[in-house]
Image (cartoon, grey):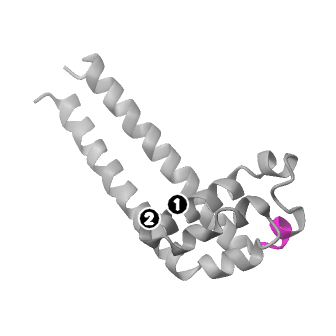
Amino acid sequence: MSTAEYIAGHIAIVIILSLFFFLALALHMAYTKIDLILEHLKNCTAIMARAPLKHGGPWGRLLLIGGISGILTFPNFYLKRGELCPEDLEKFPALLKRKLVVMQWAILILVVGMFLLALIGKSGLLK
């Protein structure tokens, strides 16, 4: 095993562990904060359309919290279509919004990193 393969392997392990950490964080937020989140975003049709996922077990709650964090991370798309209430977005607790946005960006970056590592591995650059 070359040094490059050894380093790439360790980076992959860090990425996988980080993904599991953020998955656990998302599930924790989905079980402890979802009622608060839904209460603050009750006038948003994009959120309320996803609200029944709350009763879908862990997978449904994970999809719900992921959808909400995506909407809060990229709100312009939903604001233009009228599916996100600007007043609800302004009144949403800043700390909770920051946690959801950071979680969303971290997971996106980690997934892209994993795909890049896989691409580099398949290209043969590590040998």
Labelled disc at residue 59: 2
Relative height, residue 122 to residue 34 (above, below): above
Task: Give the quarter of the figure containing the C terminus.
Answer: top left
The rendered magenta stretch, by its main secondary structure, is classed as helix
- Where residue 47 sits: x, y (%)? 71, 63
- Where residue 46 sits: x, y (%)? 74, 58
Q: Magenta segment range?
A: 88-92
- Neighbourhood count class around disc 2 (C-alpha, 10 Å): few under 14, some 14–19, many 20 upward: few
Badge 1 is on which residue?
Answer: 63
- Where residue 114 sits: x, y (%)? 37, 39
Relative height, residue 50 to residue 76 (above, below): below
Q: Nearer the viewer, residue 106 or 34?
A: 34
Residue at coordinates 81% horizontally, 55% vertically from top-left? 83
Q: Determine which quarter of the picture holds residue 104.
A: bottom right
On the picture, is 74 further left or further right than 117?
Answer: right
On the picture, is 3 further left or further right than 36?
Answer: left
Residue at coordinates 71% horizontally, 49% vertically from top-left? 74
Farthest residue toward the right?
A: 87
Give how far apart the Cα atoms at labels 1 and 2 are.
Answer: 6 Å
Q: Determine which quarter of the picture holds residue 96.
A: bottom right
Amino acid under disc 2: Trp
Q: Nearer the viewer, residue 48 or 71?
A: 48
